[in-house]
Amino acid sequence: MNPLLVILLILLIVSGLGLIVFILLHSGKGTGVSDMVASAVYSSQTGTSIVEKNLDRITIALAIIFMLALVALMFVYPQGTISR
């Protein structure tokens, strides 16, 4: 396998799994995993907003990495060009 293909596939898989994890950590109307973690770690409202901001930043970064890896795979290896 081509090293570029391996690197792009690893980036795609790792960022995809990271997106799944960090999206599930986001709170939805106060019932998310991040609220449970944040309430245990921080007792004030400002601590919760810091946790949410960091979750947002990480999720956006992972989404950008995922999209860039996907677009790179589309341009470098068009349909039907990856052979075993």
Image (cartoon, grey):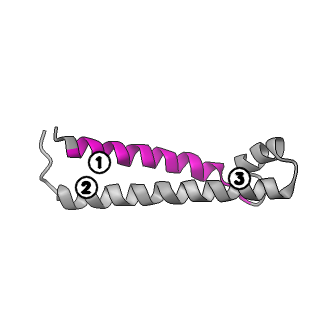
Dot 1, crowdedness within 10 Å: few (<14), some or many (≥20)? some
Circles 1 and 3 in contact, beta carbons < 8 Å:
no
Q: Is residue 13 shown left or right of residue 21?
A: left
Which amino acid type is shown beneath numbered disc 3?
Answer: Val
Task: Give the SS element for disc 2.
Answer: helix
User: Residue at the location (75% across, 43% down)?
Assistant: 37
Between 76 and 80, the one nearer to me in the picture: 76
User: Residue at the location (81% across, 58% down)?
Assistant: 46
Label 3, on which residue? 51
CA gap between label 2 and label 3 equals: 33 Å
Disc nearest the viewer among 2 and 3? 3
Circles 1 and 2 in contact, beta carbons < 8 Å:
yes
Magenta stretch in the rendered image: 4-28
Which amino acid type is shown beneath numbered disc 1?
Answer: Leu
Question: Tag on residue 84?
Answer: none
Which amino acid type is shown beneath numbered disc 2?
Answer: Leu
Dot 3, crowdedness within 10 Å: few (<14), some or many (≥20)? some
Label 2, on which residue? 73
Label 1, on which residue? 8
Task: Give the SS element for disc 3.
Answer: helix
Q: Is residue 40 visible?
A: yes
Q: Quadrant of residue 53?
A: bottom right
Q: Is residue 27 visible?
A: no
User: Residue at the location (77% across, 50% down)?
Assistant: 35
CA gap between label 1 and label 3 equals: 30 Å
Q: Position of residue 7 (x, y in %)?
A: 28, 43
Q: Earlier in the sequence, mark 1 or mark 2?
A: 1
